[in-house]
Image: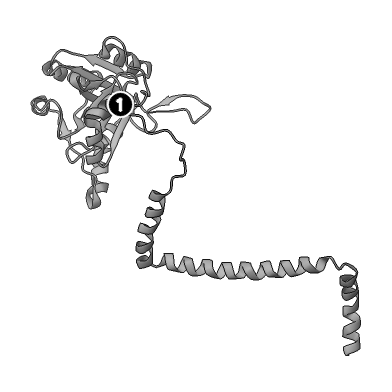
Amino acid sequence: MKDKLNQARLPSQKWYNTVPFLTPCLIFFQCQISRSNVQSSESIKKANIYMNPLENRRARPRILDRLRASEPFEDAPPRPAHYLPVTNTPDGDLVMRFTAEVERLSGKVHTVSSSHAAIEAVFTILNGLGNVSTVMAWADLPIPELLSTFASRNVDVNFPKARAAERQAALIRAEPIRVGLTGVDAAFATTGTLALVTNERQGRLPSLLPPVHIALLRRDRLYGRLEDWLSLEGRTAMLESNSIAFITGPSRTSDIEMQTILGVHGPGVLHIIVFNV
């Protein structure tokens, strides 16, 4: 039996002996396998350490210290004191530039002289839409007397709060409402963009759910560029709010055959009423 086994091994041994230069290669290959097995076991140990929450908390400061101590770009220039603007400062009247940008995106701008005229502009828009008996609105509008005017003209106001257990019922009540009414925390003339800061009395649904969005913009809330707002009060607003909606024209998409369609993901009609305080 032993002789048969030796004869069976003979061809391979003979081949092995005829190629002597493979010997160090095979030894090196075996060493690499052993080394990789050791490295794999060490990696598993490290992985187990980092999966431990306590060890993970201990590792975090070490990692951060190493990142702070490293200087991967030693020749990088220092941070500039002033950055180049993303958009150019508009020349001339900001309202004119803002109106041109919004209308280019199929939005509509109504410029009036006072808050009283802004209220009348709201009802002119509502009358043009037909029988509007309910609007969805912010609780904190820039024209407080507008809410009492709604009551005197038999228009109900819905202040949606779609949270937790009330969410489903609130969305069902809000679904048939055709008009959403909000204020504007900031607007930017160079792009025709509105910034709506979310808080307890300024929800997101009025600007997202109804097919028609009416935004009340105070003239002093109109800035030339986004950077201008950020340098003044925008940074604080972004830190204090959970979310900020930036709205540039009506909702639009071109996913299907590159054909632009309005109102697919939000309001398809946007009215912006600019008024002086």
| Along the viewing direction, whichever of 100 and 236 lies nearer the viewer | 236
| Along the viewing direction, whichever of 230 and 69 lies nearer the viewer | 69
Image quadrant in which you'd find residue 203: top left
Residue linked to disc 1? 227
**Point 38% across, 66% down: residue:** 55
| Along the viewing direction, whichever of 117 and 96 lies nearer the viewer | 96
- Residue 178 appears anywhere in the view: no
228 left or right, relative to 44: left
On the image, the x and y values in percent for residue 254 come to 47, 28
11 left or right, relative to 263: right
Badge 1: few (under 14), some or many (20 or more) residues near its Cα, within 10 Å?
some
Against 234, is 7 above or below? below
| Image quadrant occupied by the C terminus | top left
- As drawn, which residue projects farthest toward the top? 92
Against 28, is 128 above or below? above
Image quadrant in which you'd find residue 84: top left
On the image, the x and y values in percent for residue 188 come to 29, 22
104 left or right, relative to 129: right
- Residue 75 appears anywhere in the view: yes
- Its colouring scheme is one colour
